Amino acid sequence: MIIAVLIGAFVLMLLLNVPVGVAMGLATFLSVVAAGSEGDYIVSMRMASGVDSFALLAVSFFILSGQLMGKGGIARRLVDFAGVLVGRFPEGLAYMNTLTCMLFGAISGSSAAAVSSVGGFMIPEMNRKGYDREFNVAVTTAAATTGLLIPPSNAMIVYAVAAGSVSIAALFLGGLVPGILFGVAIMAVCAALSVKRGYGRGRPAGVREILVAARRAAPSLLLVVIVMGGVLSGVVTATEAAAVAVVYSFFLAVVVHREVKLSELPGLLRSTGITTAVVMILIGASSGMSWLLTMENVPAQIASALLSGLNDPVFVLLVINVTLLSVGAFMDLTPAVLIFTPIFLPVAVEMGMSEVQFGVMMVANLCIGLCTPPVGSSLFVGCGVGGTSIARVSRSMVPFLAAMFLVVLLVAYVPVLSVWLPERFGLMGR
């Protein structure tokens, strides 16, 4: 009965367009009350304990770092750098778009920020060069999700908190190769469509131009080196590295590039606070829901049903992937990670999958949902920047989504893609 009340209340509130975090908290409260317990006390206690994590400070710091980078003229410099690297190819602008989104997404840690910042430059430029508008928006929207896999990634931190016992550094390294594969798959689709549609060749760059662009982009790209180098060397934790990233981003945006004024900082801090509050509400509410599901033995029952009913690990993994893909289309990434990690992680571990591989697979799956209607946030931002409709872009998204899902299946069935780097650095047991 308790689970029926929980699911019923949660689904009803989602249908009424209640915010996900509020829906989770109220559904858990009603379920606990239905069980005859003191709902307000238990839910509030679980919410408080859920956000009582030092690692979650990294989320707030990385959000602020991304805000500073987004306002600090980083996108233009990365576009120029990507242009001199791949601009000479027939589909050069599409490659530029993808590569810039990969670089900017990794630095900012936000797919929506990558779409708006990079798309603001690249989509109009591609329009002028004769690329189809819907194709341009689709490329930008798909490529922006790679930054959620390429470290540093807030999504990985949220998963680490939900999983409870996995190294953030291991997750960062685990997502690197799949994130690059996402980008390569998107570029492959760009190449095929560019040949078919006859998009023109870009302009080759000289050695001097390449060196100038690299010099301009190097300070921004150094952020990833600082964060990952500090974490992997053991000098700083992931949370401390995030704080270092804020200091470096501030220095770069305010002092070096001088594109962020001190008067703009209160607005950036306010925006960071609002985003952080939303994330914390989601984490706190999901902690209460996860506790209730665990108390009712739901994860164990689902694991037993999947493993005994399907009796084939290959098919079980396929079912999990399709389920996550479907969830991603109707729920944003953060609440989906928080809700479904305690449900599916025990199943994956029972089949011999590492927590790192499952986390990378889950985030990669849910990244696809950011590009699909009805709630794909990256898709909405891309359509707004590109000045087109979701219906028109959705058709252009299909080949990109297919390529991305193929990478997800590779991550699911080829463990070495996500665990080789963490193993090489001795992080799998930490």
Image (cartoon, rainbow, N blue to C red):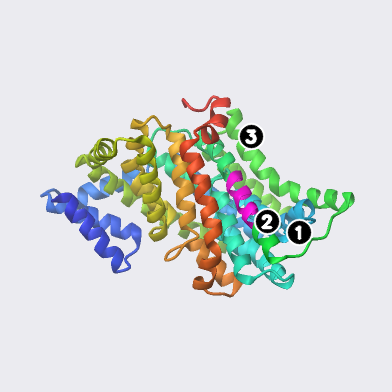
Are there few (<14), some (14-19), or many (20+) residues within 10 Å of tag 2?
A: some
- The CA span between labels 3 and 2 is 34 Å
Give the mark nearer the N terminus: 1 vs 2: 1
SS type, badge 2: helix
Q: Which residue is mark 2?
A: 191
Among numbered discs 3 and 1, the one appearing first in the sequence: 1
The residue wearing badge 3 is 229
Residue 181, by quadrant, is: top right
125 within the magenta span:
no
Residue 303 can be seen, yes or no? yes
- Pointer 3 or 2: first along the chain: 2
Residues at marks 3 and 1, CA–CA distance in whole angstroms:
36 Å
In this view, the mark in front (3 or 1): 1
The location of residue 208, given as percent across then percent down, is 89, 50
The magenta segment: 180-190
Residue at image location 50% in from the left, 71% down from the top = 390
Q: Amino acid at mark 1?
A: Pro
Q: Give residue 105's position: percent from left, percent from top.
A: 60, 52
Q: Which mark is residue 90?
A: 1
Q: Is residue 181 left or right of residue 317?
A: right
Crowd band around label 3 with a 10 angstrom C-alpha radius: few (<14), some (14–19), many (20+): some
Secondary structure predominantly adopted by residues drawn in magenta: helix
Marks 1,2: beta carbons within 8 A:
yes
Instruction: Indicate yes or no whether the magenta region holds residue 183.
Output: yes
Q: Residue at x 23, y 53 (%)?
A: 28
